[in-house]
Image (spheres, helix red, strand yellow):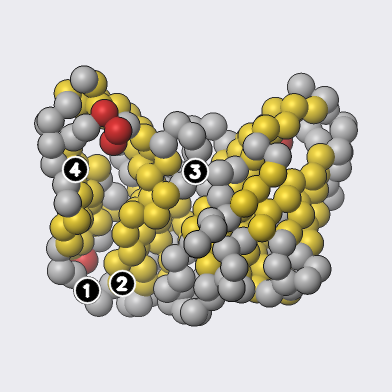
Amino acid sequence: EAGVAQSPRYKIIEKRQSVAFWCNPISGHATLYWYQQILGQGPKLLIQFQNNGVVDDSQLPKDRFSAERLKGVDSTLKIQPAKLEDSAVYLCASSLATGGGADTQYFGPGTRLTVL
Amino acid sequence: AQKVTQAQTEISVVEKEDVTLDCVYETRDTTYYLFWYKQPPSGELVFLIRRNSFDEQNEISGRYSWNFQKSTSSFNFTITASQVVDSAVYFCALSEAGYQKVTFGTGTKLQVIP
């Protein structure tokens, strides 16, 4: 079974530029998550989708970050414009969504973003 | 509010030594789930174990074992006879029933020296 796919693996941009990350979850997984992991810290949830609806985006900086999952499968996370503090690894995860917090999340390899 | 504390920032051990990674959690729910993930240098978070709050049985999987104690709100992870391939950052995480959000600890970086 294929795991969670992400691209690109690495991205270097200048501040104020835009960037987009793509994620394809494990087949059949209804729930998709985007996390931000700053060096030396644990992952922080940015947004959670169940199918194509948003479940939680309370920690997404909506003035510059946006995400969509139009067909309930793959997803795109965008940053526009990027700031220096956005330098981090962006992790995508998916789960079956059996509900009740019992889901195990499976993670992709991440995209390492460097903002200069 | 849920919280996970991993007090050990970095641990170094010599190969074949046993090592225990500590995890302490806080939650108001009676039903919750605890997880351990491994993050090797490649960056991908690898799922190791999930435990629900009603199952306090310790678990052993090869060289890995987990000790869940509700009385002390701890879910510690022991690697027996450590190997260089165990070098990674290990994260403990918690989710509460009825709420899909997972809270991660800050991680413990384990270095196994040959």
Give the spatial CA distance, label 1 vs label 4. Answer: 21 Å
Q: Residues within 10 Å of mark 3 (few under 14, many from 20)?
A: some
Q: Are marks 2 and 1 in contact (CB under 8 Å)?
A: yes
* Residue type at tag 2: Asn
Residue B25: percent from left, percent from top: 33, 57
Chain of the residue displaying label 2: B
Element carrying mark 1: loop
User: Residue sitting at 53 percent across and 75 percent down?
Assistant: A97
Residue at numbered disc 1: B55
Q: CA distance from mark 2 to mark 1?
A: 6 Å
Answer with the quarter of the image where residue B55 lies: bottom left
> Considering only order in the chain, which callout, 4 or 1, is on the residue closer to the N terminus?
1
- Please name the amino acid that badge 3 sits on: Glu
- Residue position marked by numbered label 2 in the rendering: B52
Q: Position of residue A24 (x, y in %)?
A: 66, 58
State the mark number for residue B79: 4
